[in-house]
Amino acid sequence: MTKKPLLSINNDAKTIKGLGKGWRTAILYMRPTLKTCPYSTEGCRKGCLWTAGRGRMSSVQAARHRRTSEYFKNPGNFRTRLIMEILQHSKYCFKKDLNCCVRLNGTSDLDWPTVISYFTDYAYVTPPYQPVRFYDYTKNFWKVVFNRQSRYYLVYSRHEHTKTWQLWLLKLLRKNSAVVFKGPMPKTYKGIRVVNGDESDLRFLDPKGVIVGLKAKGAAKKDTTGFVVHV
């Protein structure tokens, strides 16, 4: 029996906007738990978007449960399948003359060193493959600070325990932080320029050293933990 795919391709409004910019996006959506999101906070968990949009559909939730179960049952086999799907995605992008990007933590915050290093070591920059650009959000501050993989772009996801000095350190390092706002999108936050992160999901195209502003959606609109910044 053919196994169902792990990656979702351009299946939401933000990634479709990216397609208009010439980027085809593949995202891995899993079930967010304390195992798949080890750096999560109370505010993050309460406002989680894993059931937002198409995520409200029972079939979509079942698929995310299935992937998560498969990952923990046989992580080695899961990574092999994932690499093969990324290669297929890359070949399709080459054929259609599209840029290729992959986000492995659509609704999780796992480390993917084996998968990422496989593509950063070998790159697949020659036909019939299109170079793969990886990107993710993470709540692991130091992971962003010490990230040296040029093909893996990381954005720090601010939460209710984030300190101002952390945002400014990332700005000085020319790295970005994502902040969830309720109300009109501000032009600055803590003195740092804000860009609209809802215009597309292509975070690696954002200016460097800025705040990526995201509008509160779903349960996050009712946040009282400080995870969402009220404007």
Image (cartoon, grey):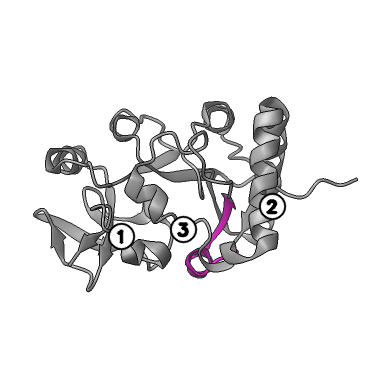
Quadrant in which the N terminus appears: top right
Position of residue 191 measured from the top left corner of the image (x, y, whole percent)? 8, 54
Residue appearing at x 30%, y 60% in the figure: 223
Of residues 149 and 109, the one drawn nearer to the viewer in this rendering: 109
Q: Which residues are magenta?
A: 11-27
Question: Mark 2 packing: few (<14 Cα in 10 Å), some, or many (20+)?
Answer: some
Quarter occupied by residue 205? bottom left
Residue highlighted by disc 3: 49
Disc number at residue 223? Answer: 1
Residue appearing at x 69%, y 56% in the figure: 95
Q: CA distance from mark 3 to mark 1?
A: 13 Å
Residue highlighted by disc 2: 63
Task: Name which of mark 3 and mark 1 comes first in the sequence.
Answer: 3
Task: Name which of mark 1 and mark 2 comes first in the sequence.
Answer: 2
**Are discs 1 and 2 less than 8 Å apart at CB?**
no
Vertical comparison of 226 with 125: above or below: below
Q: Is residue 70 magenta?
A: no
Q: Secondary structure at mark 1?
A: loop
Between circles 1 and 2, the one closer to the viewer is 1
